[in-house]
């Protein structure tokens, strides 16, 4: 559900301020990891960021509202964790500037998208030795999407918890709160699962194609290099 | 959204209103402050005025009403989810929860709809690490090339009879299709930086434009700013329970 | 050669940035078995015209008929009868290998494997790239990619071929190969051709009829190539140059 | 016309898929003020050669010198003296509007706003696209984009212009405009030209010297256009066709 960007002014300040700080730390740390990368590498990660945005721009009508694919999983696998986080951050900033998701929650949105994307590469690495690479890509993508969704719900739940209760809230019964939570999950769970399925299917097709045409682009491939020649050592064991 | 993206970009680059001439710096500051103020406003009174100001800004920037409406409704879905999880029957709380993101979204639309992206990214990229700052410019440019590529791809799929069949077949074909775009993006990226190099870009992409230069039109931004602050102070009690 | 299979009259399209293309003046008509070439300066609306014929753009004004239907609404009905090569041929290649790509359309239309195999090998032979069948498209040269895309357009034996600048980026000898191929398809299978191009040298060997557009989309003239290239005034106004031989011909006819 | 500003000798480049281009046979030399055209079939290595001159590829074997330095190592030293138009003009356009894009290089080199405005309007006028100045680049037609990229290459008044298929996708009259423009730049400002193209019609008006490559990269011949086009054997081997007038010339000389 990482595609459903959180807007400004809904969540309590404590949550989004913490999100901003964490994301900034993430950017700085990832920048330290990618210090001295070649220009081609920057161009490559920008191309994939552009691709994420372009793909998000294609509406896939599967529910009442349009679900947008993110490609966060495959992009994470192609780039490795550090660059994947940077790409997620840049994509979130541009989306915020386009009115999709707010300015104040850039941090939270980047974290939700970025953490999912970052985990794709290590999970893929674990799986790749045990199965065909396209399937590993699909499974890693499913994992990263699930993680993003869980994070997204966690942010929501935490925010609900942290919101100041007003006098009116006191009157609302405790069980009603639980019912509301239940309704929310019932509403979102099927959407989440469909989203994960769509995204993984797409990742499978994409990886199958790359595996045939440019196996060197997928890590663990023929030449082993996931990136252009002047690639950095970043974040790859 | 495929059109929204290109449309906003188009309006930012080709518009000729006073807002387009005002400096990017003042518009960016105004946007950040207004959103900041809105987010911390607990009563709906000032928020209604903010919204009126935001819509007025967007419309006087000659942004089409449809686009403004879209910007205003986009955040409502999330706000609705939030309200479901926190429903307590208080109308004033609902109003505040709905108004804040809408104000932010419309003000942001006005900002991006009147400011070409290099002006917008120049100050932002300055406070970010080089890799991230450069990516910001390059990613934005890449979006349009890839969008065009996706459009052509969609055309090819349509003309070659691919938009049918089982869900699985369609998924596979989509994956293959996106694969060609990934490859294209990869190859293009390799040449992109070479081109920037050939055309004199050294080390860091500068939005070497006039984003800081104050203009006469910035007076209007100050006026809007005054309206926001005045309403925040004067109407602070309107809507308090 | 009489039944019109394409008929475009006074179509207008306005792009989102308010560039307006008004394809008016003369009607654009292609008859069965005809070879039609569209000439005109850059940005005059050639691609826009072809997009309307292919149902990729719906006319905001005016009328488009292809095989008797409105392509913007019912293109799927006539899709199998129309083969297409767009301006950027390599973007039309979707599948990883040449065989996969050429078989893309027949597979989508539900032919059996045997039929697909048969159709693909015929198409590859027509274009002369059987030897590439199992290569990965991505590694082919520009000219080879264009031939693959052409094979993909031919594979269903369309009655109408729509080609947007098919010669761009090819070396002269490959251009002639494609002209010969198109003429053979037209002669032997009665395929009608609509070709937008800037290469005036190829118009005489390729066209029965030429349409000339000017900036803004107005269709200024139509007629057999020899006639069009004799109208010096027209060519000047539309940034077209007569091919070298035609110029000579003019000189000699003037001298006579 | 004697000092060599470009010198490429026996360069080899092997692409990741092990396609090897070996630019050998003759040395590739451009003298100051010379107009050089490169001809050859698709995939022979024309673009590869230009990439070496621009320092985009480092020679794995052999030697490249441009303005006396190795471009792969020190291109930034000579960058302002070289204007470039790559094969895919689209990829060369970086900024959102035509004006922004053409002003990209001068802004990067720190010219004042007044100077930048002056330079840009001169460049736009030279190429004849003043009317596009405030259009958004990604909405232009193919030909229009190429002209924008060309204006961007001309804006700093370089001493050497490197053009990879600058005429692709342009209408004939725009082609001639560009040929005239290039010749004027050469005559009036002494700009040296290196042009790869498939359009043989433009070689005679454009070139002082022609290099002919064959598949694999071998440089087979060099010489003034008239001489090259007289060598029928050479042209056959390299998929080049003589321009129409040259052919006529051959016929008549043979008849005589
Ligand atoms: N997607 C688009 N958005 C905005 N304007 C467009 C778009 N596509 C084309 N145009 C404009 O419409 C006009 C016609 O374009 P079209 O591509 O049909 O020209 P063309 O005759 O094919 O040109 P070329 O010979 O350069 O390919 C041009 O002025 C172009 O700028
Ligand atoms: N990135 C690449 N990866 C693999 N092979 C390549 C790559 N670029 C070029 N080649 C191969 O190198 C050879 C020379 O290519 P090059 O682009 O220099 O040819 P060209 O003369 O410019 O052809 P064209 O006239 O079609 O533009 C071709 O065989 C081509 O397939
Ligand atoms: Mg066109
Ligand atoms: Mg080339």
Image (spheres, coloured by chain):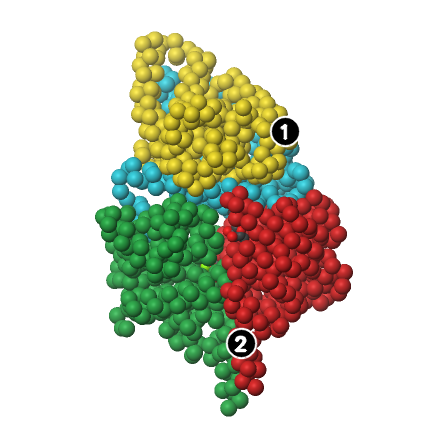
Chain colours: A yellow, B cyan, C green, D red
Chain hosting mark 2: D
Q: Quadrant of the N terminus of chain D?
A: bottom right
Q: Position of residue B101 (x, y in %)?
A: 46, 28
On screen, residue B92 versus residue D219, left or right, reads: left
Q: Position of residue A96 (x, y in %)?
A: 50, 32
| Mark 1 Cα shell of 10 Å, populated few (<14), some (14-19), many (≥20) | some
Mark in front: 1 vs 2? 2
**Residue at 49% over, 56% down:** D141
Q: CA distance from mark 1 to mark 2?
A: 60 Å
Q: Which residue is mark 1?
A: A35
Along the line of sight, the residue nearer the viewer: B61 or D19: D19
| Mark 2 Cα shell of 10 Å, populated few (<14), some (14-19), many (≥20) | some
On screen, residue A3 versus residue D183, left or right, reads: left
Q: Which residue is mark 2?
A: D247
Asked if marks 1 and 2 fall on the same chain, the answer is no
**Residue at 52% over, 45% down:** D18
The quarter of the picture where residue D128 lies is: bottom right
The quarter of the picture where residue B111 lies is: top right
Where disc 2 sits, the SS reads: helix
Residue furthest bottom in the image: C256
**Residue at 70% over, 64% down:** D34
């Amino acid at each position: 559900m990482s595609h459903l960007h959180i807007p400004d002014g809904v969540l309590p300040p404590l949550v989004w301020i913490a999100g901003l700080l964490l994301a900034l730390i993430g950017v700085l740390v990832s920048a330290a990891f990618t210090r001295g990368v070649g220009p081609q590498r920057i161009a490559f990660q920008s191309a994939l960021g552009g691709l994420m945005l372009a793909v998000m721009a294609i509406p896939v009508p599967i529910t009442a509202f349009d679900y947008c694919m993110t490609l966060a999983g495959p992009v994470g696998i192609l780039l490795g964790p550090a660059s994947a986080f940077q790409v997620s951050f840049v994509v979130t900033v541009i989306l915020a500037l386009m009115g999709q998701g707010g300015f104040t929650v850039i941090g939270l949105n980047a974290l939700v998208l970025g953490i999912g994307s970052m985990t794709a590469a290590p999970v893929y690495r674990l799986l790749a030795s045990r199965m065909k690479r396209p399937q590993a890509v699909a499974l890693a993508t499913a994992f990263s999407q699930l993680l993003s969704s869980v994070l997204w719900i966690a942010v929501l739940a935490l925010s609900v918890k942290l919101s100041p209760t007003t006098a009116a809230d006191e009157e609302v019964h405790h069980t009603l709160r639980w019912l509301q939570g239940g309704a929310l999950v019932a509403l979102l769970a099927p959407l989440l699962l469909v989203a994960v399925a769509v995204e993984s299917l797409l990742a499978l097709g994409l990886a199958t194609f790359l595996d045939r045409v440019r196996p060197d682009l997928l890590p663990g491939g023929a030449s082993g290099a996931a990136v252009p020649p002047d690639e950095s050592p970043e974040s790859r064991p | 959204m495929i059109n929204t993206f290109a449309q906003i970009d188009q309006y930012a680059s080709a518009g000729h209103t006073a807002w387009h001439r005002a400096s990017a710096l003042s518009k960016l500051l105004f946007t950040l402050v207004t959103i900041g103020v809105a987010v911390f406003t607990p009563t709906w009174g000032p928020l209604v005025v903010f919204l009126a100001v935001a819509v007025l800004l967007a419309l006087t920037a000659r942004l089409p009403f449809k686009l403004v409406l879209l910007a205003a409704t986009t955040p409502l879905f999330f706000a609705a989810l939030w309200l479901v999880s926190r429903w307590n029957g208080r109308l004033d709380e609902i109003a505040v929860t709905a108004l804040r993101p809408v104000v932010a979204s419309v003000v942001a639309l006005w900002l991006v709809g009147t400011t070409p992206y290099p002006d917008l990214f120049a100050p932002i990229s300055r406070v970010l690490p080089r890799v991230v700052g450069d990516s910001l410019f390059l990613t934005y440019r890449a979006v349009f090339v890839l969008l065009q590529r996706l459009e052509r791809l969609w055309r090819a799929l349509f003309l070659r009879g691919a938009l049918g069949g089982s869900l699985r077949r369609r998924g596979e074909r989509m994956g293959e299709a996106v694969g060609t775009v990934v490859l294209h993006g990869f190859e293009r990226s390799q040449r992109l930086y070479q081109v920037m190099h050939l055309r004199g870009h050294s080390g860091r992409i500068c939005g070497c434009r006039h984003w800081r230069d104050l203009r006469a039109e910035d007076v209007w931004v100050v006026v809007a700013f005054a309206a926001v602050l005045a309403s925040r102070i004067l109407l602070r009690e309107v809507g308090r329970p | 050669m009489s039944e019109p299979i394409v008929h475009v009259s006074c179509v207008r399209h306005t792009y989102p940035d308010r560039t307006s293309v008004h394809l008016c003046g003369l009607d654009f008509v292609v008859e069965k078995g005809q070879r039609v070439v569209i000439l005109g300066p850059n940005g005059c609306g050639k691609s826009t015209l072809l997009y309307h014929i292919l149902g990729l753009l719906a006319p905001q004004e005016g009328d488009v008929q292809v095989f008797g239907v409105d392509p913007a609404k019912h293109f799927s009905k006539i899709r199998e009868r129309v083969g297409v090569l767009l301006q950027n041929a390599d973007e039309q290649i979707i599948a990883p290998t040449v065989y996969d790509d050429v078989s893309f359309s027949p597979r989508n239309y539900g032919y059996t494997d045997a039929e697909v195999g048969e159709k693909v090998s015929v198409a590859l032979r027509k274009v002369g790239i059987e030897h590439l069948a199992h290569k990965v498209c991505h590694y082919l040269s520009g000219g080879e990619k264009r031939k693959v895309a052409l094979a993909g357009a031919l594979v269903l034996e369309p009655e109408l071929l729509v080609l947007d600048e098919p010669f761009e980026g090819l070396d002269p000898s490959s251009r002639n190969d494609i002209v010969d191929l198109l003429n053979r398809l037209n002669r032997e299978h009665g395929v009608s051709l609509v070709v937008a191009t800037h290469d005036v040298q190829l118009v005489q060997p390729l066209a029965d009829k030429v349409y000339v557009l000017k900036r803004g989309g107005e269709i200024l003239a139509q007629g057999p190539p020899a006639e069009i290239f004799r109208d010096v005034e027209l060519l000047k106004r539309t940034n077209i140059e007569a091919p070298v031989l035609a110029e000579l011909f003019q000189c000699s006819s003037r001298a006579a």
